[in-house]
Amino acid sequence: MLADAHAHLLPRDYPADAPECFPRMTPVDGDTARELLFGSLRFRARDAFFDAERRIEEMAASGVDFEVLSPMPPLLRYDLPLADGLALARHVNEFTAELCATDPARFAGFGMVPMQDPDTAAAELTAIAEAGLRGAEIASNVLGASIGDERFLPFFAEAERLDLPVFVHAMPAPMDRLPASAMGTYVVGIEGALAAASLISGGTAAKCPGLRISFSHAAGGFPLMVTRAQYFWSGTWNEEPPVRERAIMPDDGPSPLEYARRFFYDSMVFDARALRYLVDLLGADRLLIGSDFPAMPREEPAGRTARLLGLPPEQEADLLWHNAFRWLGIDPPVRSRTSVADPLRAGARAGETGGR
């Protein structure tokens, strides 16, 4: 069984009378795809973004039994006027709830909130829960501001109170130290690292100990940065017992690595060696399968690199399936022993053997 905890959707349409700043989805001649128009963004969205039946077919083709669906990140536009940002979030959330309701045993949906106003974002979490959505997706920065800034604490505190998990998706912030071509590669890794580090260094992790939060792309460079923070906290290498007289940071509670092991991280690091490091440092119980599907193609089959690690069966099962539901805070759906992908695989086997 495999759960993909990082997959995206787009609404099929937007209201005809929507504000000018809203996205638009226009038909593509001779195709089931639609084109997303949002400011300067032009993106061809194939039908798996908005068609539940098509999603299920593609899940079967890749060996995916369950998806956690969140809005495609470019929809997280915190520069919109508050009223428009809230209206957009509610429209996207309504579509997400409707799509996930078509098959709750296969889909869990995350809503979006207008983080440009943290109090409004916090208040909107109740509506997200009442709509049957399982959590909220936010960007790794809010108009360049760290999500660990104290102004966002009410949002995280309310998510903790409502027992709603949060998914932090890395999004580029304005930067002039790398070329624009690096925005989707290196800058995304930097952004994930800054987001996770800010929640520890800014005190949110300490003030919201029950918050279940996950980071896209394993929080970028954070898993390598946090070991340096651990050294400054402990004065020792290799997470050996602290030597207080050598430590630079005060002993004011859990260590940086202890905080890091409260977070969840998806496995989109594109290399078994990197994934092995995450298992060794953070634990197999902290990792989730992720794909960015359908914005990016999945591994074929999904979870292939995780399986290459040769983990003990219980750890592999955690990574592929159980951790996603621990993060969501719900029981896994009751499924037969037959995976959603098995009928398609059986057909492929029959084709290979001439149907014998």
Image: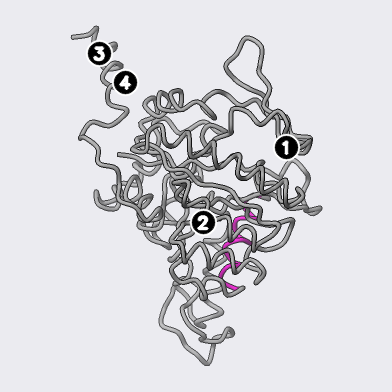
Which residue lies under the disc numbered 1?
22
Residue appearing at x 66%, y 18% in the figure: 27
Magenta region, residue range = 188-201
Q: Residue furthest left?
A: 356
Disc 3 from disc 1: Cα separation? 48 Å
Look at discs 2 and 3 and give the one toward the viewer: 2
SS at mark 4 in the image: helix
Look at discs 4 and 3 and give the one toward the viewer: 4
Which residue lies under the disc numbered 3?
350
Q: Are marks 1 and 2 in contact (CB under 8 Å)?
A: no
Residue appearing at x 41%, y 78% in the figure: 240
Q: Going from the N terminus, do you reach mark 2 or mark 3 first? A: 2
Give above or below for 269 relative to 355.
below
Q: Are marks 2 and 4 in contact (CB under 8 Å)?
A: no
Look at discs 3 and 1 and give the one toward the viewer: 1
Look at discs 2 and 4 and give the one toward the viewer: 2
Which residue lies under the disc numbered 2?
126
Disc 2 from disc 4: Cα separation? 39 Å
Disc 2 from disc 3: Cα separation? 49 Å
Q: Going from the N terminus, do you reach mark 1 or mark 2 first? A: 1
Residue 75, how many percent across, how many down?
A: 65, 41
**Looking at the rendering, in which quadrant would you find the C terminus?**
top left
Q: Going from the N terminus, do you reach mark 3 or mark 1 first? A: 1
Disc 4 from disc 3: Cα separation? 10 Å
Residue appearing at x 40%, y 53% in the figure: 328
Disc 1 from disc 2: Cα separation? 24 Å
The numbered disc on residue 344 is 4
**Amino acid type assigned to the residue bearing label 3 in the image:** Ala
**Amino acid type assigned to the residue bearing label 2 in the image:** Thr
Q: Going from the N terminus, do you reach mark 2 or mark 4 first? A: 2
